Amino acid sequence: MKNDISIQDDVVVKKINKNFINISTEWFEFYKALAAKNKYLVKVLDIDIKHNILYMENLGNCIHTEACLKDPYLKNRVTKETVCDIIIALNTAWSDSIEFSKSLQGNEFFVHTDLSLDNIVLTPDNKIKVIDPDSFQLIDKLLYTEKFYMSQINLMANLGIYYNDL
């Protein structure tokens, strides 16, 4: 079941319709701690635990970074700075969450479980943001790591295509 996303008073409202994702006060505290350190993470302004809703900053009409690198009509939006920010966003979203996870009990990790180029976007003002904050989940023993390293491979392959077409 897909999540419901709407805009109310210039705030993005995301109703999470996945049974395995439950937003909690603990989740919000963890995410706020990460987002305070990482400018690339979309800001979550508030939560509604009872209804499993996130209230997030409105980034405007964004473009997935993979599309920016592949689509010849969008390539003019990509600069060296944009490329660097995409690489930094992907890597720091992961490494900052691993650093944060040092403070957690046992083998628990708080990581983005769907960290892919589809969840890294270019905003209308040419900023790079990591979206889908509800994919940050408390997991056991570093499950979902393949998503991160496959995204690294995908990013480098797309950058190769991008630079070969310039």
Image (cartoon, rainbow, N blue to C red):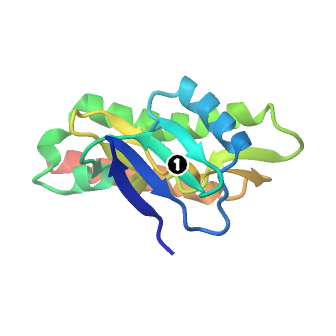
Residue 2: horizontal and vertical position, in percent?
A: 47, 70
Residue 79: horizontal and vertical position, in percent?
A: 21, 33
Q: Is 145 displayed left or right of 4 in the figure? A: right
Q: Is 146 displayed left or right of 142 in the figure? A: left
- For image coordinates 82% across by 37% down, the residue present is 104
- For image coordinates 44% across by 47% down, the residue present is 131
Q: Amino acid at mark 1?
A: Leu
Instruction: Between residue 40 and residue 85, name the one nearer to us.
Output: 40
Instruction: Between residue 9 and residue 36, name the one nearer to us.
Output: 9
Instruction: Between residue 158 and residue 5, name the one nearer to us.
Output: 5
Location of residue 166 (image quadrant)? top left
- Decide: is 154 above or below 95: below
Q: Which residue is mark 1?
A: 54
Residue 50: horizontal and vertical position, in percent?
A: 65, 55
Could you classify mark 1 by the number of other residues whose Cα lies within 10 Å: few (under 14), some (14-19), or many (20 or more)? many
Location of residue 78 (image quadrant)? top left
Mark 1 residue element = strand
Most extreme residue toward the top is: 37
